[in-house]
Structure formats: structure tokens, C-alpha cells
Image: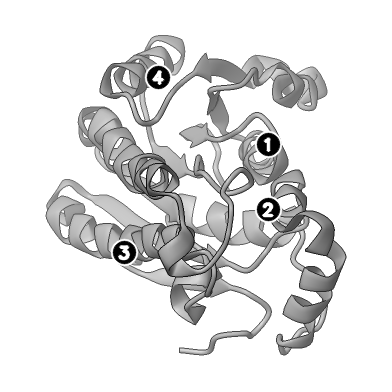
């Protein structure tokens, strides 16, 4: 499905970002696993297919850093066909009432979760245009569609991702670059465990109970939707936000 496509995945050191990288390579593509942390374990998980991926150190909030990430992709593989904007502040954010959220945390969430996506899109634009087009997949969240309370910094940042996706899709369509988003519910990853802390098990049970499909989301469930959006099978789909939430929010 992704034969020969070169895809950059940010936030790829662990969790669902690692799953996206594995999925790209298993589907015949080439991956750039990018993160502030080391992606060596992600590359190791590829086994014999490791040569189809490279690691890149990136801080998505820093323009020079994301430009270097895009340059590394071009140097290694000669083109850029896809970008999965997965990097985000999530696990380390502290929830609470809207008027008690730390201002520094609010600013950090907006910088990484919104500006970081803008930076990465700017960095890959020329490479995708020169390749004849491409697909950008932005990771939003069910939090934005549902209106998750007591985490307003996170909820607001992920709502901004949806607006960014729609506006950018209109700007880049003539260059044959598609821009879509997915809005998953809480995925069973290390990040979700850290975000909910001691309430982790209770939170997952509550989330599952509110879905039409009453089980918690696994990384592979989300990867299939991302794979489709990166592939030519979705070549006439742009500007959309797809909820991958087991039927929590139905638009």
C-alpha cells in the first residue's frame, strides 16, 4: 500500500509513533523516525528491515531542527511523500480546572502541539511539491471533538490542529498535497498511562464504556487509518478529520 513512499514520523521513539514507523516499513515504504529522544529502539523493532529507515533527532518547536529533519530525509531517500505529525505534549501535562492550569504548561502545549505541526509542514512542503505531491496526517484527538474537561490546554491545542488541517488542505491542494487529521480516543500506550497516572485503569474503563465498540484503542487500530491516509487509496480525500474512537463521537 505504501510501496516506495518516504514518510517522516515525528514522536517516533515509543508508543504509537513507533507503531506508525513499523507500519510504514511493513507496507513497503521508507521511514524517518524522528523524536527528541533516541529512536534506536524503534529502528531495532524493524529487525531485518532496519535499512529501510533512519533516525533523526528533532525538536518540532525549533524551525532549524525540523528543517534538518527534512534535509536528512531527502539526503537518505531522495524524496518526501508523507508526514505524520505525531509529536505532542500529552503524557507530561498536568490536568486541572481551566483557571488553575499553569501558564507555562499552556504555552508549551500550544508551542509543541500547534506550532510544531506548522513547523514540520513548512519543512516538508518543498520536498513534497518537488515529488509531485504527498500526504500530511496530523494527529488531533477525541479531546477536541468531545470537549475534554480538566485538560483545556491539551483540548484546545488539538482543536487548533483541526483548523490548521482544514486551512492547509485548501492552500496545498493545487500542489497535490493532501492534509488530513485523525482524532483518536485514548490509546493504550505509555503516554496514556502517564497522563492519567493512578487513575489510568478507571479512565480506560470509563472511555471504553462510552463507545459503541466497548474496548480500548490499540496502536494497530489507529495505524490502519493513518496508513490509508498516506496511501494513494485516499488520493481524493483532504481537509478531513477522522475520529478513530470506537463510536464515541459520530459526525
Tell us which disc is closer to us: 3 or 1: 1
Say which of 202 and 208 sits in front: 202
> Marks 4 and 3, Cα distance to the nearest angstrom?
24 Å
Q: Position of residue 16 (x, y in %)?
A: 67, 46
Residues at marks 2 and 4 touching, judged by CB atoms closer than 8 Å: no
Q: Is residue 155 visible?
A: no
In this figure, which residue is indicated by the disc labeled 4? Answer: 69
Callout 3 secondary element: loop
In this figure, which residue is indicated by the disc labeled 2? Answer: 195
Task: Say above or below: 221 vs 55.
Answer: below
Q: Residues within 10 Å of mark 4 (few under 14, many from 20)?
A: many
In this figure, which residue is indicated by the disc labeled 3? Answer: 238
- Label 3 or label 2, whichever comes before in sequence order: 2
Task: Say above or below: 170 vs 248.
Answer: above
Q: Residues within 10 Å of mark 3 (few under 14, many from 20)?
A: many
Name of the residue lying farthest toward the front: 100
Residues at marks 3 and 2 touching, judged by CB atoms closer than 8 Å: no
Q: Residues within 10 Å of mark 2 (few under 14, many from 20)?
A: some
Tell us which disc is closer to us: 2 or 4: 2
Say which of 11 and 222 sits in front: 11
> Marks 1 and 2, Cα distance to the nearest angstrom?
18 Å
Callout 2 secondary element: helix
Residue 18 shows which numbered tag? 1
Q: Is residue 81 left or right of 212 when viewed as pictured?
A: left
> Marks 3 and 1, Cα distance to the nearest angstrom?
25 Å
Q: Residues within 10 Å of mark 1 (few under 14, many from 20)?
A: many
- Label 3 or label 1, whichever comes before in sequence order: 1
Residues at marks 1 and 2 touching, judged by CB atoms closer than 8 Å: no
Amino acid at each position: 500500500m505504501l510501496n516506495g513512499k518516504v514518510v517522516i514520523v515525528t514522536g517516533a521513539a515509543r508508543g504509537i509513533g513507533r507503531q506508525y514507523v513499523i507500519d510504514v516499513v511493513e507496507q513497503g515504504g521508507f521511514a524517518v523516525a524522528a523524536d527528541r529522544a533516541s529512536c534506536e529502539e524503534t529502528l531495532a523493532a524493524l529487525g531485518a528491515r532496519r535499512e529501510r529507515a533512519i533516525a533523526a533527532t528533532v525538536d518540532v518547536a525549533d524551525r532549524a531542527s525540523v528543517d534538518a529533519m527534512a534535509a536528512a530525509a531527502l539526503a537518505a531517500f531522495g524524496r518526501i511523500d508523507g508526514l505524520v505529525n505525531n509529536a505532542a505534549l500529552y503524557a507530561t501535562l498536568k490536568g486541572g480546572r481551566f483557571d488553575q492550569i499553569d501558564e507555562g504548561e499552556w504555552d508549551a502545549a500550544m508551542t509543541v502541539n500547534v506550532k510544531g505541526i506548522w513547523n514540520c509542514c513548512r519543512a516538508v512542503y518543498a520536498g513534497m511539491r518537488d515529488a509531485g505531491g504527498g500526504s500530511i496526517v496530523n494527529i488531533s484527538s477525541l479531546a477536541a471533538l468531545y470537549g475534554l474537561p480538566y485538560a483545556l490546554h491539551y483540548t484546545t491545542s488539538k482543536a487548533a490542529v483541526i483548523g490548521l488541517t482544514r486551512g492547509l488542505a485548501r492552500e496545498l491542494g493545487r500542489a497535490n498535497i493532501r492534509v488530513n487529521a485523525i482524532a483518536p480516543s485514548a490509546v493504550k500506550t505509555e503516554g496514556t498511562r502517564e497522563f492519567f497516572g493512578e487513575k489510568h485503569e478507571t479512565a480506560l474503563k470509563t472511555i471504553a464504556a462510552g463507545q459503541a465498540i466497548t474496548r480500548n484503542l490499540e496502536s494497530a487500530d489507529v495505524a490502519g487509518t493513518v496508513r490509508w491516509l498516506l496511501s494513494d487509496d485516499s488520493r481524493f480525500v483532504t481537509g478531513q478529520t477522522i475520529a478513530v474512537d470506537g463510536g464515541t463521537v459520530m459526525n
